[in-house]
Amino acid sequence: MSRPPARVTAVLGPTNTGKTHYAIERMLAHRTGVIGLPLRLLAREVYDRCVALRGPSVVALVTGEERIVPERTQYWVCTVEAMPVGIGADFLAVDEIQLCADPERGHVFTDRLLHARGLHETLLLGSDTMRGAIAELCPGAVFLRRERFSTLAYSGSKKISRMPPRSAIVGFSVENVYAIAELIRRQKGGAAVVMGALSPRTRNAQVAMYQNGDVDYLVATDAIGMGLNLDIDHVAFSGLSKFDGRRMRRLEPNELAQIAGRAGRHMNDGTFGVTGEAPPLDDEVVEAITTHRFTPLKRLQWRNSELDFGSPDRLIAALEEASDNPWLMRARAADDLLALQALSALPEVRARASTSDAVRLLWDVCRVPDFRGISHAEHASLLEAIFRFLHQDGRVPDDWLARHIARIDRVDGDIDTLSKRLAFIRTWTYVAQRRGWTRDESHWRGETRAVEDRLSDALHERLTQRFVDRRTSVLLRRLKQKEGLVAEVNDKGDVSVEGQHVGRLDGFRFSQDPKASPDEARTLRAAALAALTPEYTLRADRFYNTPDTEIDFTEQGGLMWGTHAVGKLVKGPEPLRPVVEAFVDDEAGPDVAAKVQRRLQHFIDRKVVTAFEPLLALSKDETLTGLARGFAFRMVENFGIIPRESVANEVKDLDQDARGALRKHGVRFGQFTVFIPALLKPAPTRLRIVLWSLAEGLIEFPESPPPGLVTVPAIEPVRKGYFAMSGYRPAGERAIRIDMLERLADMLRAKDTRGGFEASPDMLSITGLTLEQFAALMTGLGYRATRGEREKARPAPETVSETSPETVSETVPETGDEVVAEAPALEADAPDASHSTGDAAPADAPDAGEDAAARDVAPAESGAESGAASSAEPGADADTAAEVEVEVFYTFAWGGHRTARRDGAHQGGKPEAGPRAKPDGRGAKPKGRGKPKGGDKGKPGGGRDRQEQGARSFEARPPKKDRIDPDNPFAAALMGLRTKD
């Protein structure tokens, strides 16, 4: 009894009609079945669904690069090219049958249309455009029309930046897809990428990101039009033309509809439109897509399937044979035919292909796809090697295959590099799948599959790294869901929202991650600030209760809470009342900003009260009246330090009672400066410079000198008033601290500043300078320094001086190098030089008020000591003369500022070498010279013309030997006295 002919049913209709789902149900209803699908990706998807329903032991997956065939296989899920023909399955289905018109692969689908049949049922699934062709080529076929579950509407053109979530943007080249995905990442947080060239593993991983909601956008090629079932609400075309392998051509309406139909799954309506540079769709095209009415197909691609393997030429002729059926159009030469033509032209190949089996083997080799996309010549060269191995040895050598696979088995490189390696491994995967081509098929199938999996995973990772910003996508999703975002701030200030790092919280200001692109900025800030609102309040409460020890100000006027900048100081209504400007984000709210501002104002107010307590007490003393009160106001204006020359007249006008009232508040009327010694400590000095900089309106504040230094370099240029606010007075190339300067001035009062004197060890000690540096300092103060040399006196053995020259030399080496010594601790009750001088400093010289006759004594004694120390007996032993050491000394005399400027000593800061003195060690006293008279009080060197003043000069040359007898028993004692101050 003959079997009745198999029923052929054509299930036609637009996308989203459930045709593939219907075919799977029908196949599983039979004992055995085969279904052919257009893409490897779709085949894997259907295979997974069948395995879930029937188990892996009865479902096979066969594609060009993958072959999973259990022993008890009942259902075959395949690509159309890999469909097993003639196995006698009860059911057979071919999906997307309209691909019969495809220029590249259409002939394969046409062959299945004509010859592939199930024993009991055959389903042809596809577009309604195939109705006429199927009716003509498959007489007796039954047609089923399935309508779309949901509606599809055209939404026009949209910018990518305004693309709605759950959208798919379609590009028609790899470069276009990458560019769109990069733009989506910057603006929307990321996108999944789906292309036909991806391996199933990579494609599934990318699709899973989209389906799970990790990203809301999908960027794909037209591969998504071939049955991939995704939850897409909107499809946007970035172009309307594609390269079909030969030329650029415009997509037909039915092709656009195939892709646009992916929008709106099952009962959800969908939309489609254009974006980027794609022009708006014509009204006719839009109507055709929305109503699913397209021009029926009139010609199908066809290639002769009745092949002649007698010889390569006869095989080529059979493949190029044309059909006399008007529906069937001979397909253009495909890659396999081009490879056959190239190989058959080689003499060696023609010699080997001398039998029908050899020709059949040659044809099987030529059908290896050119996954690599290289030139036909290179692909033909590879196929020639494979054919030679198979014809000669019956299999591909393991070592040869291993070498090629090893070169590909690397997961480093970028997306393009990994994509090329995946294309290469697909060639060897195809070779390993061919039965009988390798010695151990299972080994090489596993090996190539493992390499493909590793490359697929690496490619998925690179795609995700490049096109997905997980941080932004997570935040966008949570914001969209209107859920409460959880923000965490670690001890370093790093802010993470939902586990994603978004920036830093510095005090009360949020700064987003600098790595974020400008397009991500708004999203990150919105997400972070929405989550940080409670954090601002908690941090403000904690800051308000923090002790002052945890808050500080910087030398630029900034206010710090630990390592966080929380505000800055700005100029206030009064010098000692600065105003605080808090650094608080607007999003934190006015309450937080006010609380932070109040806490900072309390802090700085207490700092000012603590540091300037004597000055504030002076300003609040209501017992001060008249000139004393006015002078107190001047002290407050100048932060407790005023150079005396700037207030010389005011000081002169103060009577003793007024001065006494001011001294009760610690005011000291020094020879050079009027100041409060307690305010010279490091803390008040540091704050004073900041407040002074604010009052002066400086943009960049100068730093305070390091604490504890007596002198510092007088670096130019500096703003006028800086050294006074720092507690120093410039003197030549260095500046000396004003309290130490007053101590030095006290010492100078006891010296013959007119006749000349030498520096004592105490002077060098309190300044911490070498003799050369001290000379420069004195020159800067208006003194004339005269350099001389003499024989160094050796003290008598029985005499021990309090401060020997050797000790001074060790303490302050006379090398000329810069030496900075720590000053003695400041004392609030430091001796006031004015106590012994009536407060008013001598107007013309530091030694004003001393008896002129008393001043004449020092030069004489000094000269005598010099002569005694330097004298030598004529005829002394040569060895003794050789031991004589020469020392440098300076003689200082008041020169006045004019003389100093005239001589250049004050400007350059260098002492000059004076004229040699007379042999008796004393200079001639000019006529008309007398005791300096008062002029400008408080200014050294004031009074009458400085050019009329002079200083006694001294000579280092030993005096005449008849003046002091070297054999005199008192000579040694005189030498010892010289070392005493």
Image: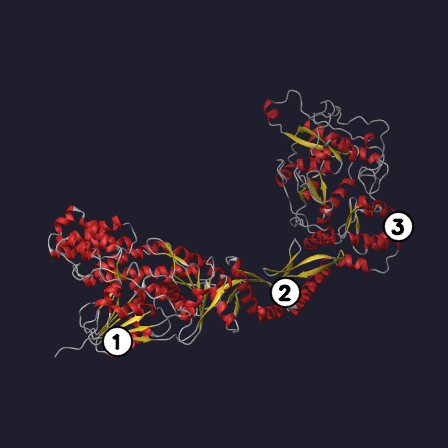
Earlier-in-chain disc, 3 versus 2: 2
Residue density around tag 1, few if under 14, some if 14–19, many if 20 or more, within 10 Å: many
Name the front one of labels 1 and 2: 1
User: Looking at the image, is 773 positioned above or below residue 483?
Assistant: above
Q: Which amino acid type is marked by label 1? A: Met
Label 1 near label 3: C-beta < 8 Å?
no
Earlier-in-chain disc, 1 versus 2: 1
For this rendering, which residue is in front, 237 or 658? Answer: 237
Which circle marks residue 604 in the picture?
none
Where, quadrant-wise, is the N terminus in this rendering? bottom left
Which circle marks residue 655 in the picture?
3
Secondary structure beneath label 2: helix
Name the front one of labels 3 and 2: 2
User: Looking at the image, is 510 positioned above or below residue 400?
Assistant: below
Residue density around tag 3, few if under 14, some if 14–19, many if 20 or more, within 10 Å: few
**Left or right for 616, reference 331:** right
Name the front one of labels 3 and 1: 1
**Left or right for 918, reference 536:** right
Q: Label 3 vs label 2: CA separation?
A: 57 Å
Which residue carries the number 2 mark?
Answer: 586
Where, quadrant-wise, is the C terminus in this rendering? top right
**Left or right for 347, reference 839:** left
For this rendering, which residue is in front, 763 or 614? Answer: 614
Residue positioned most to the top = 875
Residue 805 visible in this rendered orientation of the protein? yes
Q: Which amino acid type is marked by label 2? A: Asp
Which residue carries the number 1 mark?
Answer: 27
Secondary structure beneath label 1: helix
For this rendering, which residue is in front, 742 or 614? Answer: 614
Q: Label 3 vs label 1: CA separation?
A: 120 Å
For this rendering, which residue is in front, 52 or 498? Answer: 52
Determine which quarter of the picture holds residue 863: top right
